[in-house]
Image: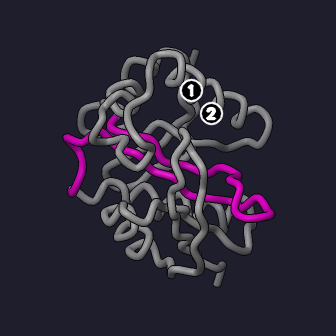
Amino acid sequence: MTEKRILETERLYLREMTISDFAALCKILQDEKAMYAYEGALDDEEAREWLDRQLVRYKKLGFGLWAVILKETGEMIGQCGLSMQPWQDRELLEIGYLFCRAFWHKGYATEAARACKNYAFEVLKAKEVCSIIRDTNTASKKVAIRNGMEKADTWVKHYRGVDMPHERYVADRK
C-alpha cells in the first residue's frame, strides 16, 4: 500500500498512519513521560484503539492525527494532525501533537503544528482552530503560542478517572 502524504515541511512530512505504524506509535503512547498529560502510558489494547480511531477519522472526516516522518531518516518521530474534540458543549477543530521524547525540544512539534494550522485554514477553510492542552503541560502550551495561538478559556476534562484542568489556545483565520 502506498503511503498517503498530507503535508510537507522543511524537515518533515506528515502522512496517514497505517496498521504497520503500530510499533512506532507504541514508542510514544507507551512511554510514561511522553504520556504524562494523559495520566500515563497506554497498554497495547488502548494503543490499538488510538490507532484505529485515527484510521476511522481519515475515512469519515478526511483528517486525523498523522504520522510525522523525519525526512532525513524516514523515521516516524511523532504524530500531529487535526481532530474534532469535545470542549464544554460543542466540538472544535483541534491541532494535536505528541512526539517521541528523543525528538522533543528540536522544533519539530511547532513545525508540524504550523503546517496543520495552514492546512486547517487553506484546505478545510476553517475559521478557527485550537489546541486543547492540560494545564500542567508547559511544553505543549509553548508550541501553541509559537503556532500563533492565544489562550481563550479553561475547562476541566475527565479522563481515566481524573479531573484534568485544560486550557484552550485558539488561532483565527486571518
Residue plotted at (24% across, 42% down): 101
Residue 97 included in the magenta stretch of the image: yes
Pointers 2 and 1 in contact (C-beta within 8 Å): yes
Mark number for residue 54? 2
Which corner quadrant of the image does residue 137 belong to? bottom left
Above/below status of 152 relative to 96: below
Quadrant (top left, top right, bottom left, bottom right) of the C terminus: bottom right
Looking at the image, is 5 positioned above or below residue 46?
below
Q: Which mark is residue 63?
A: none
Q: Main secondary structure of the magenta part?
A: strand
Which amino acid does the dot numbered 1 rest on? Leu
Residue 148 at what x, y percent from top left?
A: 47, 78
> Which residue of the protein is positioned furthest toward the bottom in this rendering?
174
Residue 45: x and y in percent read 53, 16
Q: Quadrant of the N terminus?
A: top right
81 sits to left or right of 134:
right
Q: Is residue 168 magenta?
A: no
What is the tally of numbered marks visible in this picture? 2
Bounds of the magenta segment: 77-105
Residue occupying the point 60% across, 50% down: 158
Mark 1 = which residue?
Answer: 51
Left or right: 92 in relation to 102: right
139 or 112: which is nearer to us? 139
Q: Quadrant of residue 57?
A: top right
What's the residue at 46%, 60% (across, down)? 134
Q: For this rendering, which residue is in front, 137 or 4?
A: 137
Q: Residue flagged by tag 2: what amino acid is it?
A: Gln
| SS at badge 1 | helix
